Structure formats: structure tokens, C-alpha cells
């Protein structure tokens, strides 16, 4: 499983640096097996081709790119805790300690002692494998099996699971003072959090209340819903008065509906999608610029997609004899509301 | 209406435009000259580039007799031909021709010729004031770009698909499997994206400076500009709204588009064509998708942008956009057609003071023809198709997947069907229940 996994760039780099460091620094001093054995032991199933190479790299000068890759793979195999492998037949403490020391130290030493390897060449080498580029899931099995079983048929390679390194004891337990301080901190922090959240919820609640209040302003800057448009004789038969559109959004029409001459107020909202149609005097129709709906003078839809007639506002003759339109009430033809005497004024 | 200085204004642009065409073709000719065996084409494009240079100098004169333009007869012919019906039928025919003869059109020289002819015709048409007013309007320029970009990318994909289809027919792996190298996201992809981001930002900056966005007067709820157009990417939706009720064309159909696109991978049972372009191996998917994309989205955007004028009337490309154009668009609901026109009876209407249930009953009776038609379309048709046309599909997909596929397809086709019904029978709504704002 682990070998199928792709190596990250960071792993490749770490391996390369480790190899450099080892090749340059660790080699003359340390006896060979010490440096190499843990890695090899951890991966007994390592391919034979790859195995000698790390050894050579360890022994000789700079490892080749292929060696670095092989080593990186081997490292990955044996796990980062290869140092702790108990299987090493070496003087008990030494190799483990040495390897452990070498490993973390190597990346630091690498850049100083070893020959610097740049990222590009390592990445290029990583790509120039058997098949260029990362391997997709589907291709992975088709790849030449990189690790043939060792010819030694006698022993089955045992998968060695290195034990976890013991967690270092938290040092805080040592002194009583520190414990107290931390406890104090915790309480302080907890209290701060509690305070913070309380403040937050209170603020949020107040904000919501303020927002709700905002919906009911003290002053409405819009025109009143009831307004007067003048006397009846200002609207001769057949006239569509458009001068109230900009301010009130209403056409006052003296027209004929079902054979009755009426004055009615049509709402200037298209019943299709709410655009404002325009009155075309020459064609005697309301025409919507958005989707081409057309309405007769009485508001009945006849062309385009509008599904129902324009709506009427309430209209009446006020006490002073003027026509008064009430925009707070609308009448829909399809619901039979145009028969309502509030929806028109008989001429 | 008519700007006497129009030709002088547009002369500089047209001169540059034809010069650009000339340079483009000269470069193409040079590249072809260096290739072996393309000398003939190289000469053709050299001559064409020379002709473009002549046109450029004529255009730069700015004189009415010299600026190259389409003849009046051609313009009025195009105007007379164009209409929603001709447009939709024409684009469908174009779609079919391009698909059937794709092996011909993917040849580079054929495509180059088509591109040159299109650009030349556009240049000639732009000497017309009405055409130029629409095409060179700053918010329409991107749509012109879209037309050419879309044609280019479709051409590239189709070319690869055609090559792959030929290879597959010969038993070879598709081109994409030959050079199968994959690259790393970082740095290869991210660097490319970064460079693209910088380049596109610079391009947009220059564009914004030279073609300022048209700002209009402050919005008002009682004043709608005429024509009132949605943002360009919604013009397809706006065109759909001409044929449908807002809840269907504005809510249901767009959601269905999104859900349908999401459902596609789950409905698809064809394992072929994965990771490479191919048309032969996925003909059904290809045709359905391209029909939905080109016919029902892109061509409608183009229609909405260039051909819909004031009052959402249809205008030919060389027609002046006057708000006084009269078009007879009287539409009738299906209930009206059935009860009044066919049976010669008044619409069933609940008597005054009837209860809610009785009213609903009368509504259902009134809408019976529409309900039956819709029921047949959406309930009876899918099983019928399953045992006839889509027998193989049904066997491979299973009941649920097949039903989803069939219903999505039928709902998609409801748009062209409704358009045709509107044009032929002036049908407004099949189902018309304004009492509950339910229309279809």
C-alpha cells in the first residue's frame, strides 16, 4: 500500500538531502552497516536493483538521482521510525541512536556539507521514471512491479511494524507553580470566551431588533396611496392619461369595457414579469418592452406571454367631486373583481 | 434617424478592420508557404490579403461611393428573410449541416475560408448604420466575440473528435492516449493560471478604457427602458420568457437545466469517450448536449442581443430599431381554441357565488384539453418511448434513470415545441389558470 502512494515533493527533497548529508558526512566516520542497515532491514522486500544502490551511495561520493529516488522509496517503506526497529543485529543502543541522530540531523547538514541539489533536477528525475508524470489509480497496477520478491524462498519477509516512539511526558507536571498559572489562564480564557460570546449574542440580538425596527420607518417618502387626479371631464372618452405614470404608476383611462363606458385606473405593471409597458397611442395598446406582451386599452391581454389582464386600482368620486385613486386596493379581472363598483367610475 | 456623418465616423474603424484582415491572411500565407505542399493555398490567401488592403484603402476614404458595403438588394433580402421562425429554422439547419458534414468543415483551410468570409461579410455589413449601431454597441461587443470564440472552440473540439473517430475506426487508440503525460498542478498549472490571470486583467483594463460601459439614467420602478434587455448571459432566458409563464421559464426551466447538467454523469451509461474527444462513440449524448447548448442557449442569446429591438419585436439585422414597428402577435390560449373556436361554446365558468370546490371543478373542466395534452406528453410518452425508440436505453438504464432522462429531455423539448406552436397556431398557453398563476 505504502509504496503505491506517491511521494510528495517534500519527501523526495528530504530524502535527497539526507542522502547528500550521509554521503558526505556520515560516510567516513560511521561504519557502513550502521548507516544503512536499519533502512534495509525495514524493507526486506526492497527490489534487488534498488538495494545495492543506496549502499553504493552511502559508500561513495554523491548519490545519483536514481539512488536518491530509490532511497526515498526505501525510507518511505521502512517508515520514519526505522531507527527504532529492534531487528537490527547491532550493538543494542548504538545503531538506533546513531540512525536516529543521523536522520533528523541530515537535512540540516545536507545543505552545508553535501553538494546542493536543486529542486528542479530532483523533480525532473522524479518525473523521468518508467512513465512520466504521476501515476493515476488505473495505471498503477499496470506499472512494472517495482519490488520483485527476493529470490531467497526460505524466509517469508515479515512485515515489521515499528513500535511507536514513546511520547515525551509533558513537562508541565513537574512544577506546581506552572500548573496553577495554567489553570488560572484557562479560567481567564474561558471566562473571556464566555464573555465574548455573551456580548456577541447580545449584540446580535440588538442588531436584529434594530433591523426589524428599520422595516417600519417613521416617515415614508413615497407618495400617499390615495391621491386625486382631477374631475371627470378631464378624461374625455377614449383617452389614456399617462401623466400620472412617473409619480404614481397608474394610467387613468376613460374606456369601454364590456360595452360600458367607464373611467378606471390601470396599474402600470405587466402581469408577465413586472416591467412597465408603454402606451402606444398610434396602435391603441399597451406594449411591454421586456417580452412583448400587449394589452388593449381596457387592460385585457391579447399578445405576447402575459397570462392575465392588467390590474385595476380602486377609484371613486371623492366628496369634492374629484376622482380619487386608492393604490392600496387592486382588482383582478380573472378573479371577476372588475365587476366590483369600486374598480371603476361610470361616466 | 440617419446620421450624415456615419460613414466618416466608421471609416477609420473599417480601414483598421480590413487592414487587420489583410495582415491576418498575409501571416497565414507566409506560414503556409513555409510548409510543403500548401503553395496553392498560400497564393490564395496572399491574393485575399491584397484584396483586403484595397478594401481598407477604400474604406479609409469615407466616401459613400467608395466604402465597401453590401448592396441594398442584399440587405433588404436579408431583412425580409429574417424573423423568429426563419432564424430558428435556419440555425437548426446550420447545426444539422455542420454536424453531418463535420469531416469537411474540420479541415483547416475550409475553416479558415469560413472565418474569412464571415469576417468579410461582417465588415461589409458594418458600413450600414443600423447594423453597426447594434454590433458596435459596447455591451454587444462581447457577444460578437462570443460568436467567434465559440465557433473556434467548437471547431477545435470537433476536429479532435473527427481525428479520433477515424483512428478508432482503424483500431488505433485516440490521440489523447498517445501523449498521456500528466503535469503537476504546482507549478505547471498554477503558473499558467497566474499568467492567464495577469494577461486577462490587462486585457479587461484596456477594454474597459476604450469601450466604456454604457451607463443609463437612474433606475425607476415606473420606467422601463425600451427595449429592456437582461444581461447577455440571460438573454436566452429572456427569449424563453416570451413563450412561457415566468414561473416556468424563469424558475423551473433554469433549475431543470442546472439539475439536468448535474444528473448527466449519473444518467450516462456509455463508458466510451472517457478522456478523449469522440462523436461517433457518443452520438446521442453529443447531439442532445449540443442541441441544448447551441440551439436553446447560444442562438437564443444571439437572437436576444442582435435581433430583438424595442417592444421585444423582431428586427432584421439591417432594420432600424423603431419603437413604432407593428407586429401582429395575437395569441390565444388552448382552452379558448378548444371551447370557443372548436366547439363553439363559451368557456366553462363557475356561476356567481359558487364554492371553492365548484370553482376548481370548473377550472379543471375548462383546462381539460390542456391537462390531457400535458398528461399525454409527460406521463404517457416516456413509457411509449421506452418500448419504441429508446428500447435499448431503457434496458441499459433501468426504470428510474430512464424516467429521469426521458422527462428531462421532454421538458427541454417543451421549449422548441412551444415556440413552434406559437408560430403556427398563435398558441399562448396550453394550460392557462391565471386564478392560481399557473400557466404552461
Image: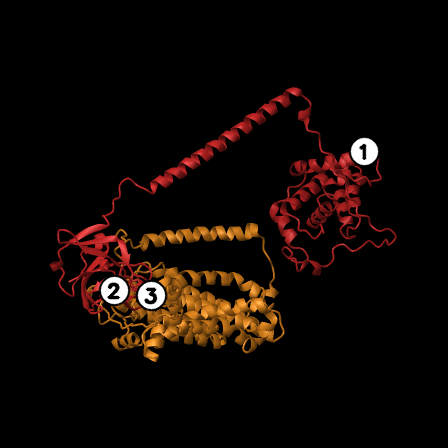
Chain colours: A red, B orange
Q: Residue at x 64, y 38 (%)?
A: A111
Mark 3 and mark 2 in contact (Cβ < 8 Å)? no
Q: Earlier in the sequence, mark 1 or mark 2?
A: 1
Measured from the top left, where is residue B259 in percent x and y? 49, 61
Residue B35 seen in this snapshot? no
Measured from the top left, where is residue B317 in percent x and y? 30, 70
In-front residue for pair A153/B435? B435
Q: Which mark is residue A316?
A: none
Q: Residue at x 44, y 73 (%)?
A: B372
Q: Which residue is mark 1?
A: A93
Check if mark 1 and mark 2 are on a common chain: yes
- Above or below residue B119? Residue A201 is above
- Apparent side of residue A133 relative to residue B416 in the rendered image (left or right): right
Q: Which residue is mark 3?
A: A307
Quadrant in which the C terminus of chain A is drawn: bottom left
Q: Nearer the viewer, mark 3 or mark 1?
A: 3
Q: Nearer the viewer, mark 1 or mark 2?
A: 2
Q: Which residue is mark 2?
A: A299
- Apparent side of residue B85 relative to residue A162 in the rendered image (left or right): left
Residue A137 seen in this snapshot? yes
Q: Give neighbour class at mark 3: few <14, some 14-19, many 20+ (Cα, 10 Å).
A: many
In-front residue for pair B192/A295? A295
In-front residue for pair B157/A123? B157
Real-space CA distance between mark 3 and mark 1, rounded to the nearest whole angstrom: 90 Å
- Above or below residue B78? Residue A231 is above
Q: Residue at x 48, y 32 (%)?
A: A198
Q: Earlier in the sequence, mark 3 or mark 1?
A: 1
Q: Give neighbour class at mark 2: few <14, some 14-19, many 20+ (Cα, 10 Å).
A: many
Amino acid at each position: 500500500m505504502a509504496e503505491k502512494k506517491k511521494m510528495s515533493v517534500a519527501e523526495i527533497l528530504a530524502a535527497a538531502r539526507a542522502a547528500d548529508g550521509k554521503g558526505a558526512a556520515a560516510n567516513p566516520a560511521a561504519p557502513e552497516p550502521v548507516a544503512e542497515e536499519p533502512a534495509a532491514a525495514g524493507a526486506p522486500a526492497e527490489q534487488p536493483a534498488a538495494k545495492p544502490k543506496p549502499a553504493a551511495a552511502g559508500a561513495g561520493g554523491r548519490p545519483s538521482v536514481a539512488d536518491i529516488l530509490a532511497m526515498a522509496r526505501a525510507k518511505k517503506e521502512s517508515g520514519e521510525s526505522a531507527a527504532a526497529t529492534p531487528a537490527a543485529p547491532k550493538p543494542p543502543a548504538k545503531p538506533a541512536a546513531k540512525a536516529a541522530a543521523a536522520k533528523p540531523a541530515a537535512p540540516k547538514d545536507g545543505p552545508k556539507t553535501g553538494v546542493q541539489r536543486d529542486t528542479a533536477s530532483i523533480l525532473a528525475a522524479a518525473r523521468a521514471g518508467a512513465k512520466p508524470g504521476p501515476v493515476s489509480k488505473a495505471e498503477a497496477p499496470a506499472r512494472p512491479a517495482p519490488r520483485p520478491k527476493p529470490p531467497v524462498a526460505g524466509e517469508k519477509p515479515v512485515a515489521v511494524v515499528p513500535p511507536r516512539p514513546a511520547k515525551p511526558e509533558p513537562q508541565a507536571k513537574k512544577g506546581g507553580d506552572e500548573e496553577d498559572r495554567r489553570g488560572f489562564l484557562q479560567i481567564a480564557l474561558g471566562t473571556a470566551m464566555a464573555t465574548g460570546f455573551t456580548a456577541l449574542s447580545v449584540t446580535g440580538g440588538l442588531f436584529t431588533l434594530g433591523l426589524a425596527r428599520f422595516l417600519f420607518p417613521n416617515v415614508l417618502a413615497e407618495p400617499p396611496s390615495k391621491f386625486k387626479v382631477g374631475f371627470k371631464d378631464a378624461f374625455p372618452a377614449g383617452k389614456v392619461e399617462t401623466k400620472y405614470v412617473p409619480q404614481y404608476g397608474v394610467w387613468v383611462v376613460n374606456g369601454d369595457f364590456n360595452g360600458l363606458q367607464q373611467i378606471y385606473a390601470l396599474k402600470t405593471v405587466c402581469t408577465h414579469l413586472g416591467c412597465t409597458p408603454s402606451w402606444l397611442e398610434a396602435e391603441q395598446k399597451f406594449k411591454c418592452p421586456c417580452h412583448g406582451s400587449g394589452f388593449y386599452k381596457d387592460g385585457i391581454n391579447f399578445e405576447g406571454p402575459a397570462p392575465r389582464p392588467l390590474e385595476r386600482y380602486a377609484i371613486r368620486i371623492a366628496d369634492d367631486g374629484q376622482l380619487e385613486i386608492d393604490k392600496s386596493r387592486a382588482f383582478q379581472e380573472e378573479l371577476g373583481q372588475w365587476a366590483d363598483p369600486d374598480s371603476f367610475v361610470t361616466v | 434617424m440617419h446620421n450624415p456623418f456615419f460613414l466618416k465616423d466608421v471609416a477609420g474603424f473599417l480601414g483598421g478592420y480590413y487592414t487587420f484582415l489583410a495582415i491576418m491572411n498575409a501571416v497565414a500565407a507566409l506560414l503556409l508557404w513555409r510548409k510543403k505542399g500548401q503553395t496553392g493555398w498560400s497564393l490564395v490567401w496572399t491574393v485575399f490579403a491584397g484584396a483586403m488592403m484595397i478594401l481598407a484603402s477604400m474604406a479609409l476614404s469615407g466616401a459613400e461611393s467608395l466604402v465597401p458595403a453590401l448592396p441594398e438588394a442584399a440587405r433588404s433580402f436579408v431583412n425580409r428573410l429574417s424573423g423568429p421562425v426563419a432564424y430558428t429554422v435556419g440555425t437548426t439547419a446550420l447545426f444539422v449541416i455542420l454536424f453531418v458534414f463535420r469531416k469537411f468543415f474540420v479541415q483547416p483551410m475550409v475553416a479558415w475560408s469560413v472565418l474569412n468570409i464571415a469576417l468579410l461579410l461582417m465588415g461589409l455589413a458594418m458600413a450600414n448604420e443600423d447594423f453597426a449601431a447594434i454590433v458596435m454597441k459596447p455591451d454587444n461587443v462581447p457577444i460578437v466575440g462570443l460568436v467567434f470564440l465559440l465557433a473556434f472552440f467548437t471547431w477545435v473540439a470537433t476536429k479532435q473528435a473527427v481525428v479520433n473517430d477515424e483512428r478508432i475506426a482503424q483500431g488505433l487508440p485516440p490521440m489523447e492516449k498517445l501523449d498521456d503525460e500528466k503535469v503537476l498542478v504546482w507549478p505547471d498549472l498554477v503558473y499558467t493560471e497566474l499568467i492567464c490571470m495577469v494577461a486577462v486583467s490587462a486585457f479587461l483594463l484596456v477594454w474597459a478604457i476604450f469601450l466604456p460601459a454604457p451607463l443609463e439614467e437612474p433606475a425607476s420602478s415606473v420606467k422601463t427602458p425600451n427595449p429592456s434587455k437582461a444581461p447577455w448571459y440571460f438573454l436566452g432566458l429572456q427569449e424563453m420568457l416570451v413563450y412561457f409563464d415566468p414561473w416556468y421559464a424563469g424558475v423551473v426551466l433554469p433549475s431543470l437545466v442546472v439539475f439536468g447538467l448535474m444528473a448527466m454523469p449519473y444518467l450516462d451509461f456509455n463508458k466510451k469517450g472517457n478522456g478523449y474527444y469522440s462523436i461517433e462513440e457518443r452520438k446521442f449524448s453529443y447531439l442532445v448536449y449540443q442541441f441544448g447548448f447551441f440551439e436553446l442557449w447560444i442562438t437564443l442569446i444571439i437572437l436576444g442581443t442582435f435581433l430583438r429591438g424595442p417592444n421585444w419585436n423582431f428586427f432584421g439585422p439591417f432594420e432600424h430599431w423603431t419603437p413604432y414597428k407593428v407586429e401582429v402577435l395575437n395569441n390565444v390560449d388552448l382552452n379558448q381554441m378548444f371551447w370557443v373556436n372548436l366547439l363553439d361554446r363559451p368557456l366553462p365558468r363557475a356561476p356567481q357565488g359558487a364554492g371553492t370546490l365548484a370553482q376548481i371543478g370548473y377550472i379543471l373542466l375548462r383546462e381539460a384539453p390542456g391537462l390531457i395534452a400535458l398528461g399525454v406528453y409527460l406521463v404517457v410518452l416516456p413509457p411509449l418511448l421506452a418500448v419504441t425508440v429508446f428500447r435499448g436505453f431503457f434496458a441499459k438504464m433501468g426504470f428510474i434513470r430512464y424516467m429521469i432522462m426521458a422527462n428531462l429531455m421532454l421538458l427541454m423539448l417543451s421549449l422548441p415545441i412551444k415556440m413552434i406552436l406559437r408560430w403556427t397556431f398563435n398558441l399562448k398557453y396550453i394550460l392557462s389558470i391565471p386564478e392560481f398563476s399557473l400557466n404552461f
